[in-house]
Image (cartoon, rainbow, N blue to C red):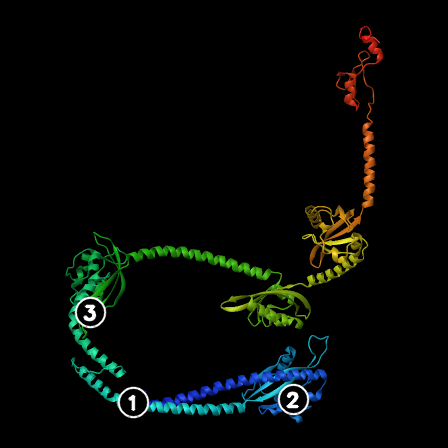
Amino acid sequence: MRFLNRWPIRTTTPLLLFFSIFVIGTFSWIYSISFKNEEIEREARYELTGKMTSIQGRLNSYFRQNYIEGIQKEISATGFDRNVITAFFIDEQNRIIAATRLAMKGKRVTSSTLGAVEHENIFAYLEKLKDRMTGSVELTRDRQALIGYFPVSIGENKKELRPFRVGILCLHYDLRFLNASAHRTLTAHTMVYSVFLLFVSLFLWLYFHFTMTKRVTILIRTAGRFAAGDHLAQSGLTGQDEIAKVGEALDKMILERRQAEAALIKEQAFSKTVLENIEDGIAVCDGEGVLSFFNRAFREFHGLPEKPLPAEKWAEYYDLYLADGKTMMKKKDIPLFRALRGEHVHEVEMVIAPKKGEKRILLASGQSLADPYGKRLGAVVSMHDITARKQAEEELRHHREDLEALVMKRTEELSESEARYQNVFETIPDSFFIADSNGNILEANPAACQTYGYSLEEFKRLNALSLISPEFRSVYKEYLESLSTSGTFFGETIDIRKDRSCFHTEVSGTTIFFKGEKRLVAIVRDVSERKQAETALKESELLYKALFKKNRSVMLLIDPDTADIVDANPSACSYYGYSKKRITRMKISDINALSKGDVSSEMRKAESEQRHYFNFCHRLASGAIHDVEVYSGPVKVGGRSLLCSIVHDISKRKASENERERLIDKLQTALDEIKTLKGIVPICANCKKIRDDKGYWNLLESYIEKYSEASFSHGMCPECSDKLYGHENWYKK
């Protein structure tokens, strides 16, 4: 824009305004055209989708009714829309069976007939639409038309998962008329907007030309006087416009210049006060190398007063040492002297070790002082006390060493963890896959290579979808949707090995983020044997049910957790006197005479196979209680653990056993009552005492009572009575 400086503002301003109007109008027109084209394409796409969906539904109805003439009429009717270039319907053999142009009817469709869309293989794309039974509206490469492709079912086979005869409804929708109309409207609007901006720009230029030129001239004259050294010059401009503000700023700058000259002396005094109060030590020497100024902090460092000494005596007098704190500085090493020689000194470490004070570690920075003409006036150096920082650095160094040791230990732990992960990855028996967000396989473990028959390099060239049987590929879509919503997935599919053999799999998946990128993780387990076992189990259950229903023994299926009677065979219903509906609503405790706790305890024994045989009393519907024997054990039915109980009525056998026990008890009682002494019993011939096994002599009655069930009562016979008491008077007959 430097060339504009050759002309005055009154000339360049209108030129810039007119150029800006042209640029704004052109850019607005181009942007509006682009935006309007996208809006027309979007509205036309929405309208065409609705229209073709409606036609699709009617064509489906016509094909079911075999109404061929209606199909041609429906296609021909679309030609009355001036935006429709052509419309036709092709069958599964890619032949046109109905079209707006009758000359096309019966011909085989080509890629040029289908339209120049972005898809390289339009026929393959149409086959995908047929498989999914979803329509699509595509924009041509020249963006002048929309082409709709919608699948229509020609014939159906109820044994198939989808219609096996599918045709395509194709409609070419012209956008040129809509675009041309929009372009004309936008051009007219842009012209009106540009004319409006032209009038506004002309008004602004006139205002600028007649109201600002004089004020700019005054401003330029005042600036010239100030540049010539007149510090009393004033523009006198006031107002809220920019020129007035520039004039006020110029007047203020001139006033501040006068005030600065008056405040210079005060500033020098203030600077000295500041130097005395800052924490860093400041030392200044003149051009001859003689110390001329110390601030308070520097005096505190060495504890000595300010003294005008030459550079040769600085180190000895002020106790200046190198960074080691032991070697005294030479003249050439002192930072202030180096700065005096013209060297730029930056953070040179030094030590002040006064004889009667605390040793301090300092960082010295300094430079030479010169006037505006380059004459050297002296040098200045600032010294920052870093004693505390050095102590902190020493502590930090110890901490860093401890941290490095901890990092080394953690690194070793991570290495061991990575080795364990790699070992798990390589030794896990299930197939383990890692893929990107598009399903392209990135890693596979050895178990996957062995199961599928591919090498790792072959896996990396495959997509996960190619490993799934076609009829189960919808599960892969569910897998991606589940991972995007919940982050996990679990399902079953049939996968294909390299030799094209199929096997049942169980898939669990999740997502991880590695180096900022999303990765899909899947663990695939071969469950073919389990599937075979499930099939065998179903056959076993069918056999079990057949035996259960037709068995003449009373059989019950009982849930051990709730004591519910899950099922009962016809023999059980007949024996207990309940209907099938009634007995399956009962609990076993409603039939068993035991308490609910005892019944539950016995069922636990049967469930854990601690006991299989039981004797119970069961209550019939009539109220009669029968003795039964029950054989019970756990079975698996429909994935549930139940108890299968076979019940036999033993009431008659129980009565016979009770009668037998009664007779046995009676006989045993009789036998117990018959208890006699056997063998040779030694008895005294005189006193009739009997000797026992231990050699003691016992009375006859005591011995018999001890070794038999007999007991004695004492009395006298008539002969003994006469013999003993016959001489007594009271014993007279």
- Give the crowd class for mark 3: few <14, some 14-19, many >=20 residues within 10 Å: many
The residue singled out by tag 3 in the image is 369
- Of badges 1 and 3, nearer the viewer stands 1
Q: Are marks 3 and 2 in contact (CB under 8 Å)?
A: no
The residue singled out by tag 2 in the image is 75
Front residue (pair 235, 486): 235
> x%, y% of residue 71?
68, 87
Helix, strand or loop under label 2: helix
Q: Which residue corresponds to the image point at 32% horizontal and 90% vertical from the top-left? A: 203
Helix, strand or loop under label 3: strand
Q: Of the residues under marks 3 and 2, which one precedes in the sequence? A: 2
The residue singled out by tag 1 in the image is 207
> x%, y% of residue 511?
55, 66
In the image, what residue type sits under mark 3?
Answer: Leu
In this view, the residue farthest toward the bottom is 103
> x%, y% of residue 704?
79, 20
Q: Of the residues under marks 1 and 3, which one precedes in the sequence? A: 1
Helix, strand or loop under label 1: helix
Q: Of the residues under marks 1 and 2, which one precedes in the sequence? A: 2
Can the viewer see residue 319? no
Can the viewer see residue 426? yes
